Structure formats: C-alpha cells, structure tokens
Image (cartoon, rainbow, N blue to C red):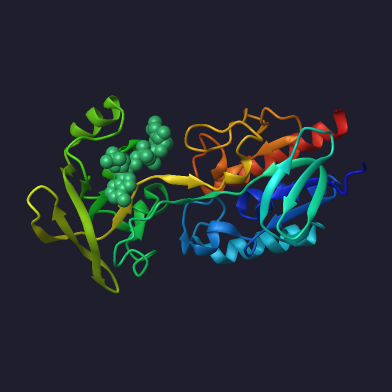
Amino acid sequence: MEAEYDVIIIGGGAAGLSAAIYATRAQLKTLIVEQLAPGGQILNTSDIENYPGFPDGVLGPDIGVAMHKQAENTGTLFAFDTVIDLHVDEDVKVVVGEEREYTAKTIIVTAGGAHNKLGVPGEDEFAGRGVTYCATCDGNFFAGEDTVVVGGGDAAIDEGMYLSRIVRSLTLVHRRDELRATKVLQERAFATDNFNFKFSHVVKEIRGNGGVDRVLLEDVKSGEEYEYPTAAVFIYIGFHPNSGFLQGKVPLDNGGHVITDIRMQTDVPGVFAAGDIRQFSDRQLGTSVGDGITAALSAYRYITEG
Ligand code: NAP
C-alpha cells in the first residue's frame, strides 16, 4: 500500500503548526487533522508576553492565525476530522478519523490537552481576567498583588514557588489537610515567607467586578463560608492530555502523556509526539513550537534515512 502523505500531524495547535511548517519546507507532503479551528490553546489566550521576538507582547489569536496562515502558505493540507484510532504496526500508518481514514509514512501526535477545571461559578466568567491555569504565563500580570493558588499537587507547589517571587503573597487553598506534592517541594513552600496555606478549604465561587477581586471559600471541616480577597486565582488541579485514542498504540505514562525521547520519537518507529501531550512538556508556547520543529526534523530523517 502506498501512503497518501509523508506526514500526518494530529492536532493543529502551536506544536502541530510548527511541525507542519518545517515538514512542508522539507518537501514532505503534510496533512494536519484537526477537530476544531487550527491554532489550538493560543486562540483562547489573550496577552502572551513571554514568547521571544515580541517585546510588547502579542495576542494569542493573532499569533495562532499567523501560524495557521504560514502553514497554509508552505503547502500544508488540512482535514477537519476527529481521530478515533491509529494503526501503527506497518510501514504505512493509518489514521482513523470519524469522517475517513488517512495513510502516511509518519505520524506526529500534537493533540494537546486541557487543564482540569474547578467547575465553580465565576471560573469561566473571569477566565483571562484573573482566573488562570499558568503562573509561568500570567504571573507577571499580578506582580505585587495578593493571589490564590488552588490544588495540592506538584504543579500547584511548583508554580506557586515561581509565583512567590513575583506576587506580594499567595495563599494555597487545598481541599485536604495534607498536600499531595512531593516532600521536597512541600518543604520549599513551607519555608517561603509569602507562601500561605488554607488547608481543608475549597473555593466555592470566584467573584469580582471586571476582574477577580475575591473568592468565596468554604472551610470543609466547620462548614463556614467566607470571602477572601485576591487579585487572581491560579488553578492547578490536574491536566488531562487528549490521548484516549492512543491507548495501547504508543507508550503513555500514568497521567496519559506520550513518552518520547529527546528527538520526540515514541517507542513506535515513525510515530512522534510533540507539545502538551508529551511527557515532561513545559506546556509553553515556545516549548511547543520547539517540540514541533524537532518532531518534523525527526520525521524527515526517518523518511529519508530509513
Ligand atoms: P495532581 O498530582 O493530580 O494533583 C492535583 C491536585 O489537585 C491534588 O492535590 C488534588 O487534591 C487537587 N484536586 C483535584 N481535583 C480537585 C478539585 N475538583 N477541587 C479541588 N482540588 C482538586 O496534578 P498536578 O499537580 O497537575 O501534577 C500532575 C503530574 O505532573 C504529577 O505526576 C506531578 O508529579 C507532575 N508534575 C511534577 C512537577 C515537578 O516535579 N516539579 C511539576 C508539575 C507537575 P487531592 O490531593 O485531595 O486529590
């Protein structure tokens, strides 16, 4: 069987579009299969101030649309479809979509993922106006302010430590009286002056006027509810990669992330992964772009060198 494409990229976010730009410029016939509009998470991100080359920042939708256009200009083909399965055992790989099947010599999986949400009133309303899932991205918008972090895992503590160097204070709200995070991270947080804790508490509502200015907390032991002032709520209650269709096809870690080597190669020859779906991704626009480029170059080498 002849493959229709040299490369099929599953997902049209920053990693996928970057991979496509490099693959097409290497004269590889490249298809992006995407179920939503190309651009990915950056389409839902307002100001991006940490992507190199934009000293005054850049709007997420602007850079998402520009990346999409650049991928189109270099000859990337697009299919609007939802991938439900893969067949990766043979030289010619099959990507099974809801609409049809596609074949390629290589696959780059850049299907991304999503942050778990609290599901409380105000979370969606204030998204991008005080509610955020990324201190590395948004911490600087709240420099010198009092903030709240939700969650008790490694991500909450890790990103809380990053935040503690920027904000005046942060209060970590955790639903139990014990953190899940590794001990070494916990100790680091306990030793940080402006890192405060509210154990056995949950955020019931996020409130504000234009932007976040307070949360409604509940002390789950006493049942008491009270308002607590904050300029922002950083939510770290887990992240789920969009990797359901990869179960049993490529090795995944316990959290469902795709395991790759530093060349973005999975255990399966000709199958690569890049961006947020990948184990140890830093989940930044810049790192996703880099991952995507590396994956495309690895696919190029796989095709040309065997
Ligand atoms: P995680 O380990 O699953 O922790 C999620 C935290 O959110 C838990 O403390 C959980 O509480 C809490 N939570 C979950 N649902 C909640 C809800 N609806 N309301 C309130 N709280 C809720 O997730 P993660 O911190 O994102 O880490 C994911 C993986 O990445 C882990 O394997 C972690 O080790 C890794 N990671 C490592 C580092 C590092 O090593 N520096 C940094 C980031 C991430 P309970 O504890 O009560 O369940």
Residue 50, image x, y percentages: 48, 51
Q: In the displayed structure, would residue 129 be above or below residue 223?
A: below
> Which of 256 and 150 lies nearest the eye of the viewer?
256
Camera sees residue 137: yes
Farthest bottom residue in view = 209
Residue 265, image x, y percentages: 68, 31
Rendering quadrant holding ligand 1: top left
Q: In this view, does 34 lie to the left or right of 210?
A: right
Q: In the displayed structure, would residue 15 be above or below residue 233?
A: above
User: What residue is drawn where x is 22% and y is 28%?
Assistant: 187
Residue 138, image x, y percentages: 38, 54
Quadrant in the rendering for residue 35: bottom right
Camera sees residue 155: no
Residue 174, image x, y percentages: 22, 45
Farthest top residue in view = 184
> Which of 96 and 271 lies nearest the eye of the viewer?
96
Where, quadrant-wise, is the C terminus in this rendering? Answer: top right
